[in-house]
Image (cartoon, rainbow, N blue to C red):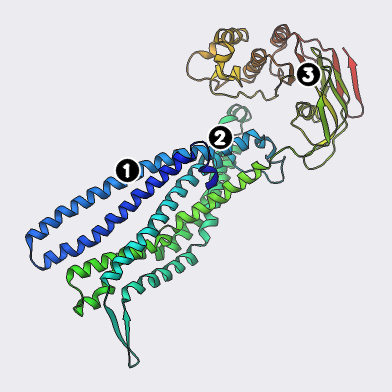
């Protein structure tokens, strides 16, 4: 993931920004060391009742604080700039693999034995979280390592005295005991933190999943508002949403319990780590080995060492979240990277004479179940084919095989060169803006705005441009009008209408299909319908029956 985020055409400028942020972090370490030295100078001035020196050190204090604030703000701004750069690169690659390989189609539930759950959340949220936390952890970790050497050097100098103990009658002397005590103190704390916090990673991983499932259910309610309202499905939707949110609440309570168990140790640790060093240094102070200023310098140096070594303790919860993000994102990247079309039993090649030919087509489901054989097709350029048959006979699946999407089964398809456009039965509208929806997948400007407006007027949708609602609230019939208008504007060589006029009344259907054929005289049209469509004369009729496949001439 890090290699992907830091690659791309701007990789060197990004690495230069990263280095600059590190340099500012190292500057902050130097300023922290200066602050440690300031502690000794200031408290020695207080102990000596030297008011002039104390006032001078107050001025030094504010100068150091100002420099630390400026360094932090500059590093924070540059880190955010680097965040959006690396996030853009990682998101670009994720989208390229998800969309470019048609993984969005093949890695769906029912089409793959390892479908990608909530891909929208992984691309939108996990890419952001990964880069954000990766930057935070790497910069903080590298800075902490450099800081640790600086702080240990200061502590080594300040803690030159030994701790003398009597154990069971034996005199024991521990030279520079404050230096050795710091890593032992933190090591024990780190081990306890890990043992208490291990359940968090699993809980955080599950929380992201159930939150995404709940958001998806809410989007489904929004996108299917008409059908749900007309079916009086409010109670069913409420039950489904309550069930999804119940999963959110149950896992959240598990997160709360795990965080509480971890917090029972980490919160007292965080609140005492700045005071404990003073207690550890008191024997040296009472023994006269250090002055009051030396004691404060020693406590400050020890606190900085232990705080730096405690990075794992302080960041444990964030690290658990980061690991969960890495696992989700890595799984998606690995699966989409190999989501290439598998070897197909359906052989395909380009038709040499512009005729669409289907021979011996036996379709199958993704899990290997063979469907009823499909009839042969021999459709010349510019002709119209009507595919008739009961629901569940495989009409839509056959169309997907012709366009090249459906790869399960066996047989042979010779497909002419040229552009194919399929208008599905559900009449989806692919954009929030009506002009963009009607010209999809091209920008409306490239097709000529006067032409787009003329087509929009022809399908009786010009009034929908008034206001700011866009395509929201379009009826199924209006959505199918958008689809037919899109076909006219895109001018495909092959147009496939899968129940694409089922919501239109016969008069409107006849009018629009006659207009469609007039606008696209050279386009080959394949249409599926439960009834013979009005306004479009079929040159061939393909009947998909339960007992026998038939092909008639119109």
Question: Is residue 64 rendered to the left or right of residue 23?
Answer: left
Looking at the image, is mark 2 or mark 1 earlier in the sequence?
A: 1
Q: Which mark is residue 219?
A: 2
Q: Position of residue 305 (x, y in %)?
A: 34, 65
Looking at the image, is mark 3 or mark 1 earlier in the sequence?
A: 1
Residue 46 in sight in this render:
yes
Q: Position of residue 534 (x, y in %)?
A: 76, 11
Q: Residue at x 64, y 33 (%)?
A: 100
Circle 1 residue: 74
- Cα distance between the residues tagged 3 and 1: 62 Å
**Residue 450, located in which quarter of the rendered image?**
top right
Q: Residue at x 85, y 22 (%)?
A: 357
Position of the C terminus, as image quadrant, is top right
Question: Badge 1: how crowded within 10 Å, few (<14), some, or many (20+)?
Answer: some
Is residue 397 positioned above or below 325 on the image? above
Looking at the image, is mark 2 or mark 3 earlier in the sequence?
A: 2
- Cα distance between the residues tagged 2 and 1: 40 Å
Question: Badge 3: how crowded within 10 Å, few (<14), some, or many (20+)?
Answer: many
Q: Residue at x 22, y 67 (%)?
A: 296
**Which numbered mark, 2 or 3, is in the foreground of this view?**
3
Question: Is residue 96 rendered to the left or right of residue 185?
Answer: right
Question: Is residue 318 rendered to the left or right of residue 518?
Answer: left
Q: Which mark is residue 414?
A: none
Q: Position of residue 205 (x, y in %)?
A: 55, 52
Is residue 296 positioned above or below 403 on the image? below
**Which numbered mark, 3 or 1, is in the foreground of this view?**
1
Q: Residue at x 22, y 70 (%)?
A: 295
- Cα distance between the residues tagged 2 and 3: 33 Å
């Amino acid at each position: 993931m890090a290699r992907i985020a830091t690659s791309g055409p701007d990789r060197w400028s990004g690495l230069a920004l990263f280095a600059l942020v590190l340099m500012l972090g190292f500057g902050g370490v130097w300023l922290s060391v200066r602050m440690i030295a300031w502690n000794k100078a200031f408290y020695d001035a207080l102990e000596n009742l030297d008011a002039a020196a104390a006032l001078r050190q107050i001025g030094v204090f504010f100068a150091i604080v100002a420099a630390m604030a400026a360094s932090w703000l500059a590093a924070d701004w540059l880190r955010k700039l680097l965040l959006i750069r690396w996030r853009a690169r990682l998101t670009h690659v994720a989208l390229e693999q998800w969309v470019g390989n048609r993984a969005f189609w093949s890695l769906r539930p029912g089409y793959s034995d390892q479908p990608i759950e909530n891909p929208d959340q992984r691309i939108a949220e996990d890419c952001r979280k990964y880069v954000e936390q990766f930057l935070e952890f790497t910069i903080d970790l590298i800075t902490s390592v450099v800081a640790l050497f600086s702080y240990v050097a200061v502590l080594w100098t300040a803690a030159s005295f030994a701790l003398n103990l009597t154990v069971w009658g034996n005199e024991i002397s521990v030279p520079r005991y404050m230096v050795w005590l710091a890593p032992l103190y933190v090591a024990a704390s780190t081990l306890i933190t890990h043992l208490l916090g291990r359940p968090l990673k699993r809980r955080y991983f599950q929380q992201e999943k159930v939150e995404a499932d709940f958001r998806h259910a809410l989007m489904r309610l929004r996108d299917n508002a008409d059908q749900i309202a007309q079916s009086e499905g409010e109670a069913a939707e409420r039950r489904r949403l309550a069930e999804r949110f119940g999963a959110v609440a149950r896992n959240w309570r598990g997160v709360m319990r795990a965080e509480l168990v971890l917090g029972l140790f980490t919160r007292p640790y965080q609140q005492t780590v700045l005071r404990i060093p003073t207690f550890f240094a008191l024997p040296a102070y009472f023994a006269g080995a250090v002055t009051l200023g030396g004691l404060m310098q020693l406590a400050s140096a020890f606190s900085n060492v232990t705080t730096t070594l405690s990075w794992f303790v302080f960041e444990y919860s964030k690290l658990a979240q980061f690991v969960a993000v890495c696992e989700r994102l890595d799984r998606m990247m690995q699966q989409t990277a190999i989501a290439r079309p598998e070897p197909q039993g359906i052989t395909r090649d380009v038709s040499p004479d512009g005729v669409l030919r289907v021979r011996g087509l036996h379709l199958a489901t993704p899990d290997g179940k063979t469907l009823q054989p499909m009839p042969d097709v021999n459709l010349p350029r510019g002709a119209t084919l009507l595919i008739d048959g009961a629901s569940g006979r495989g009409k839509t699946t056959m169309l997907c095989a012709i366009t090249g999407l459906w790869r399960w089964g066996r047989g042979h398809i010779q497909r002419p060169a040229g552009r194919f456009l399929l208008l599905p039965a559900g009449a989806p509208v692919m954009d929030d803006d009506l002009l963009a929806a009607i010209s999809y997948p091209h920008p409306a400007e490239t097709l000529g705005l006067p032409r787009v407006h003329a087509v929009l007027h022809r399908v009786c949708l010009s009034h929908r441009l008034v206001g700011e609602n866009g395509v929201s609230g379009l009826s199924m019939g209006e959505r199918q009008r958008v689809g037919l208008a899109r076909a006219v504007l895109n001018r495909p060589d092959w147009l496939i209408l899968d129940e694409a006029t089922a919501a239109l009344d016969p008069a409107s259907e006849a009018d629009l299909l006659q207009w469609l054929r007039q606008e696209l005289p050279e386009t080959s049209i394949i249409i599926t319908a439960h009834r013979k469509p009005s306004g479009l004369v079929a040159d061939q009729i393909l009947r998909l029956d339960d007992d026998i496949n038939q092909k008639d001439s119109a």
